[in-house]
Image (spheres, rainbow, N blue to C red):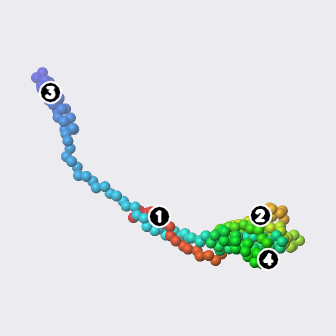
Amino acid sequence: MKHSMIAIPVAFMAVIAGVAILFQPQPAQAQRPVVVIPMCTSPVARNQMHVERTFGALAYDDRTATWYTTYGYPSKGKARKGVISHCQDKGGSCRLMLSYSNQCAAVARVIENGAPVPGKDSLNTGSTEAEAGANALRSCEADWGSACATQFVNCSHSGVNVTRWTEWQQHQC
């Protein structure tokens, strides 16, 4: 019986010692350095281009069924004035039909018995000469319900400077 009375206090003391060890302050650990990965901004080449903004306009003389065009003007107002002036210089009395920027415009005319019919015209635009011509043909056929032919295509950006540049992007150094 003597042994069991001693064993209980010894066991109790062992538990208390174990708990004390768990809650003992730990020695300070060395701080780990924070690693920062820098983000850099530098040019990354991408194929981009800049086309100067240019304007064109179309005017029509009802009396003579003649179209007048301008292209390569620096503003819409100048393109409009230019086409009307050109028409008047040729003796016409035109009305402005369309002004546009950095695209192409086309006029298609109805064809009957193999000949163009003055005054039965439709116009449309596109980003290229081919697209503008195709759009004008579709418009003409839809407008007049007849076969049509493209009369002309004019692009506002004919002969202007095209500048290439690189795009700036963020990337990891």
Residue at image mark 4: 91
Front one among 64 and 47: 64
The residue shown at (87%, 73%) is 114
How far separated are the C-alphas under marks 4 and 2? 29 Å
Q: Which mark is residue 9?
A: 3
Mark 2 crowd level (few <14, some 14–19, many ≥20, 10 Å Cα): some
Q: Secondary structure at mark 4?
A: loop
Say if residue 149 shows up in the picture: no
What's the amino acid at mark 2? Ser
Q: Along the polypeptide, which appears first: circle 3 or circle 1?
A: 3
In x, y percent, where is residue 140?
79, 65
What's the distance in space between the residues labelled 1 and 2, CA to CA?
A: 42 Å
Inter-mark Cα distance, 3 to 1: 73 Å
The mark closer to the camera, 4 or 2, is 4
Q: Earlier in the sequence, mark 4 or mark 3?
A: 3
| Residue type indicated by callout 1 | Gln
Could you say which disc has been placed on residue 139 in the image? 2
